[in-house]
Every structure is written in structure tokens, then in C-alpha cells.
Image: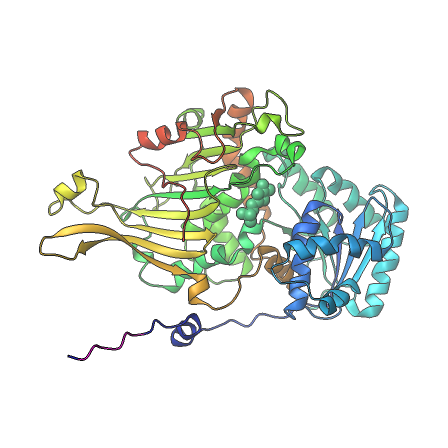
Amino acid sequence: MAEQPKRKPPSSSVVGEILGTASTKRKRPEPTAIVIFGATGDLAGRKLAPAIYNLQVDGALTEPTLIIGVSRTPMPAADFADKIKPKVAEFSRQKVDPAQWDKFASTIDYVGGEFGDDALYEQLKIQLEVAKKKGTKGNRVFYLSTPPSAFALILEKLEKHKLIEKQVQGPGVTACRIIVEKPFGRDLASARALNEMISKYVDESQIYRIDHYLGKETVQNILVLRFGNSIFEPLWNRNHVSHVEITAAESIGIEGRGNFYEQTGVVRDIIQNHLLQVMALVTMEVPASFSADDIRDEKSQLLRSIRNMSLNDVANSCVRGQYRGYREEQGVAPDSQTPTYAAMRFMIDSWRWQGVPFFLRAGKKLAERLTEVNIHFKAVPLVLFKEEAAGGVLQPAVLSLRIQPHEGISLRFVAKVPGENINVGNVVMNMTYADAFNRPIAEAYERLLLDCMRGDATLFNRRDSVDRAWELIQPVLQVWEATPGVHFYEDGTQGPSATDEMMGREGYSWRDLVPQH
Ligand code: BG6
């Protein structure tokens, strides 16, 4: 018989065609002046300037979109542009093209001076007037990329010089918005005080509290996967799910940010914000619509139903670690107890999730860079497969939402190994964004800056969620700050072994941090 020609696998673009795409058209941003306080800092160079550059190259902005950098060191705007050019070249996801760069550089202005100096704000006022004449219509966004200790002073001065005013944002209203970087406060009391302070100057609708995880495509896809497919939702509850792991592992260390990290630690840096937000998206109920407040209402409701930890829970269900060598980093105390790794278990007291443990872990200098959510389904009744289960071959199914890198979704399940006997093996079905959609994934900051200019706060944190997230981790911070006890771990490992013991006591184990492809 003639050999059948092999079927060519469809290329990524064909997959796109076959599946078809639907999109909800979103409104274009208004022309805006983006004022960045802390413009010569790390975040502005690594994330903000490259994000705005990419938005410009992609034609996503409405002209004129202008940048006004504000920082302590006085310098001409051209020098500031030259200063950030190498950063954009290094961190931009698209190559820096000379013509695009010249266009971008022509949108950059700069004001230098102390944040407490009135002259700085008078100068800023003049530049905002210039921007308005160029066509920004008075729309402005102030990005506070400074230490939180500077926020009050900056807002007070902005108000004094009539650069901000309290006004509910909405269609037809000139945009006046404040973007606040995390960490938003350092505990419940300071976060509340910060919210109180900001709300003296602006309305809640003007405040954009950033958590860049919410801008990641893969994080946004959690809701589409859950609510755009009818096959997952019926299984998404305590009847079918045994437990859930949420991991944010990094292979890098603190990258020279010793002073910041000593004040922060992994719980404030990652768990209070990024991981609790991901957990809320994985577990929240169906929102009435995709509007900002409907989604944020459901997230807030979910966070309220997470059980508060007791001191016993902190002792039994939370583990802290520190990588060896952390204490030798610049700016770190030689006897530092700051955790660079933490694992903790949360329970949700709701009809859907009662009894299902959620294990969250995050850490630096681990074996792999990997952020993912693993939904572990319950084991089958072992009537037919007792032996395979005893030998560890029969593993319950796991749905993995891989947030980064190799963004995608995979399902591990059991299949028959071909042959005359009934042998079972675990197989993995894998979807990656790179294969399924032939297009680059935008950086989180691109999406978030664009949304802020559009006046869409869906992907930003509301005051109630921030408060509740602090409330949830408060017992952990309290106990850990009162009693020393970090477990040390080596660079490039799975973290402290105490974390395996913690999972083991509950009858579970962490998925190994290994390269994902
Ligand atoms: C930031 C933390 O919020 O997130 C950093 O302050 C961390 O410590 C970073 O490295 C991780 O972000 P991403 O997008 O690389 O996972």
C-alpha cells in the first residue's frame, strides 16, 4: 500500500484562522501628559519608558502623548532622554529604531528639583500648560514612582499649585489621575493611613493602584478560561478540586535593592499583592459583567471569604526562608531575618471552596523562574487501579496555568500506554501562547498605562481589596517580625525543606521547580 503523506501540523497562524478570534473593541486613550515622579529611578528606566516607547511603536497612543520626567537632579530634557535611551534599548521588547526613537524623544520633557520645593511645581505647571497647547486638552496622569514616604509631600504640593483637584472621573471629564506603585503601605495601619491621605486630595476614581501582575496577559486569561468555557466551571469547586498551588519562583536575587528589600521581604513584595490577586481571580465567583466594578466587587467578596489566620496557623501552615548569601548583600543587616522565601496555606470559607487548601509560595534565588497556578483535581475512586495508585503511577489530573515563562496552559491526565496490557501513564496536553497565537505578548506595564489613559480601572486594585489583603497577611507579619526563625536555603534550589514538611503534613507535595517547555 502506498505510504500516506504525513499531515503537516498547522502553523500558528493557521490555528488562529481555524479557531477564529473575537474582540471587544476598546476605546482609544485620550491625548495625555504622563508626569513621572522618580523619572531617573529603576522602575522608570526598566518598565515605564520601555512601555510607553512600545505603545508608541505599536500606534496604540493618541497623539500627542507627552512624558514629563520629574526627579531631583536638574538637567535639560535632551539629557534626560539620552539617559533613558540605553534603558529602553535594553528593556524594550521591540528593537529601538532610530526614527521611532527620535519621535519618542521629541515627546519627552523634564523638570528637576526637590519634591518639597515649590519652584519645581511652578515649572511643572508651565510644562503642563505647554502640553495642553500641544493638544493634551489638560489630560494628565501623575505616576508616583518614588518611595511611598514621598507621596504625601508630592500630593500636597500638586494640590497647592492646582495641578490636581478632587473630581469624579468619567466621560467628558478632563483626566487627572494618580498611579501609585506597590507596595501600598507596609502593613494594614499604614495602608489605611495612606488611603486616607490620598483620598484627601483625589477621588477613588482618580487613584490607580498598580499591581503589574494584573496587567499580564496570562493573568487576564484566567477569567476567560474560567468563564469563556463551559467545561471548567462545573469542576471548579470543592467537589472536584483537591488543592491548589500558586507559585511565583524567581531565580534572581534582590538585584542590588538591599535597602528596599530589608524593609519589604517577600510577603510584602509578592504575596500580599501579586499572589493574593492571582488567587482571587482563580477563585472568585462569576461577575455580572466585565466592568471594572463588577470584577472588583467579586474579587473583594472573595478576599473577604478567605479565612483569617490564627497564630497557630502561622506556626503550622507558614514557612519562611532566606537564601544563603542574602546577609552579605549590600544594604542588608548581617543578622537579617527578612524572608526571601515564604510559603503559606490559605482556606476559603465559601460554599464553593470549603475545605480546599490553597498553598502559595514565592521566593528568590530558586531553581527556576516560574510563575504558575496548579489546580489539582481529586483522585478517582481506586476500584480499578489500586496497584497503579499504590505504585504512584496513577496521578490525579492537574490543570496548570503557566503565567511565565513559556506562557500557556497544560493539563496532565492519565492515559493507557499502548500495548496488550492495561498499563497507565501520565500524559500532558500543552497549549502555549507562542504556538496558538502568532503575536508577541505585550508587557504588563504597557497594558496598565494604556488602561489608565483610557480611564479603565479594571486591572487596578481598589481600596477595599488592598486593605483586605493586608488584613490577611497581618498575622504572618506580626509573628515573623516578633520571633526570629528563617530557614536557610541554597541558591538554585527548591527553597527550604521545611516547606516540603509543611505540605507533607497535609498529605501533598509541591511540584518541583524544573524548566518548563
Ligand atoms: C515586583 C517585585 O513587584 O515583581 C520584584 O518588587 C519582583 O521583587 C518582580 O522581582 C517580579 O515581576 P515579574 O513580572 O518579573 O514576575
Judged left or right of residue 230, residue 442 is right
Does the rendering let one see residue 498?
yes
**Which quadrant does ligand 1 occupy?**
top right
Q: Residue at x 9, y 53 (%)?
A: 421
Which quadrant of the view contains residue 229?
Answer: bottom left
Q: Which residues are magenta?
A: 2-7
Where residue 304 appears, x then y in whole percent?
47, 42
Report the front residue among 89 and 228: 89
Whether 452 is drawn above or below 253: the answer is below
Whether 493 is drawn above or below 3: the answer is above
Residue reaching furthest to the left: 420
Where residue 460 appears, x then y in whole percent?
58, 53
Where residue 195 appears, x then y in whole percent?
66, 42
Judged left or right of residue 74, residue 221 is left
Q: Residue at x 65, y 35 (%)?
A: 260
Where residue 450 appears, x then y in whole percent?
64, 62
- Count of numbered tags: 0
Would residue 96 be counted in the magenta stretch?
no
Does the rendering let one see residue 206?
no
Q: Main secondary structure of the magenta part?
A: loop
